[in-house]
Image: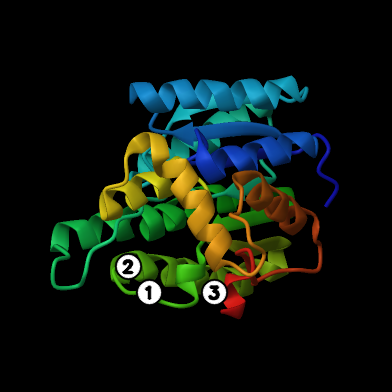
């Protein structure tokens, strides 16, 4: 797919991996509608910064308040893309949450919250966008899963279950819509330096806020074969590749710094 002049929606686009995806798409020539919880002041500020980064690359950016667990919000995101950008070619359901608990300590409410946002939110975004992609004769969906969606980890049963679900949903949907020109893939990041990851590390370890980034960098460099943490922009470049790759569908692309080798 030639990306110049295409239009995309990115959920969870205010910061972190979502910002990396939005900026990488803009660099490839794509206009972006960014969906996030922009009624939250901190996220509103971050979303404005992401939009400014997109616009600095000469592309259009538009912010939409979007709770991906609400069907009406997912539909509003698609409708906004059509109204503001006039088309929709690329869909990136990226919004997600992360928390770590043992199964014994995990509450039903937290289990349901994580699955509702990470898995059901992906389903609702895809479902809202699919009629438009099919009507246009094709397009690309790139879901954000995780390396924990390919190999479970202790203290992350609920998160792993949600991301295993995203991988399975991606493969099933790819098979379902391949004949209609829609390609569906997912990226599986790991050890990405984002505020979400740093906050979870601080919750688990008690490390002070001003030391979190330094501790993260050192610990990931010591653990991963490539001796570096993965940056959000690198996930964005993987998404751009999957948007362009006309013969690729139904895959889960790992971007992990070599973690799968351990």
Disc 2 to disc 1, C-alpha distance? 6 Å
Q: For mark 3, does the 10 Å Cα neighbourhood hold few (<14), some (14 to 19), or many (20 or more) residues?
A: few
Identify the element where label 2 is drawn: loop
* Residue occupied by mark 3: 172
* Residue occupied by mark 1: 153
Query: Mark 2 or mark 3: which is in front?
Result: 2
* Side of 80 where 67 appears, left or right: left
**143, 180: nearer the viewer:** 143
Query: Mark 1 or mark 3: which is in front?
Result: 1
Q: Position of residue 226 (x, y in %)?
A: 67, 64
Residue drawn where x is 35% and y is 21% of the image:
41
Disc 2 to disc 3, C-alpha distance? 24 Å
* Residue occupied by mark 2: 156
Identify the element where label 3 is drawn: helix
Earlier in the chain: of badge 1 and badge 3, it is 1
CB atoms at circles 2 and 3 under 8 Å apart? no
Image-quadrant location for residue 102:
bottom left
Which color scheme is applied?
rainbow
Residue drawn where x is 54% and y is 33% of the image:
34
């Amino acid at each position: 797919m030639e990306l110049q002049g295409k239009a995309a929606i990115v959920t969870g686009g205010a910061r972190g991996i979502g910002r990396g995806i939005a900026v990488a798409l803009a660099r490839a020539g794509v206009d972006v509608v960014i969906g996030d919880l922009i009624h939250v002041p901190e996220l509103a500020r971050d979303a404005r910064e992401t939009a400014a980064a997109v616009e600095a690359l000469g592309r259009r950016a538009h912010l939409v308040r979007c709770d991906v667990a609400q069907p009406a919000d997912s539909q509003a995101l698609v409708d906004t893309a059509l109204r503001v950008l006039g088309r929709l070619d690329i869909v990136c359901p990226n919004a997600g949450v992360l928390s770590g608990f043992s199964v014994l300590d995990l509450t039903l409410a937290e289990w349901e919250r994580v699955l509702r946002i990470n898995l059901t939110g992906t389903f609702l975004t895809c479902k809202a966008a699919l009629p438009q992609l099919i009507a246009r004769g094709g397009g690309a969906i790139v879901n954000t899963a995780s390396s924990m969606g390919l190999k479970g980890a202790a203290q992350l049963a609920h998160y792993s279950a949600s991301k295993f679900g995203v991988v399975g949903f991606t493969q099933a949907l790819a098979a379902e819509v391949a004949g209609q020109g829609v390609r569906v893939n997912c990226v599986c990041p790991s050890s990405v330096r984002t505020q979400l990851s740093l906050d979870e590390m601080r919750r688990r370890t008690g490390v002070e806020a001003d030391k979190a980034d330094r501790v993260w960098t050192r610990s990931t460099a010591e653990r991963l074969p490539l001796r570096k943490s993965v940056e959000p922009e690198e996930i964005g470049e993987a998404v751009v590749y999957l948007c362009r790759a006309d013969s690729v569908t139904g895959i889960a692309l790992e971007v992990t710094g070599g973690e799968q080798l351990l």
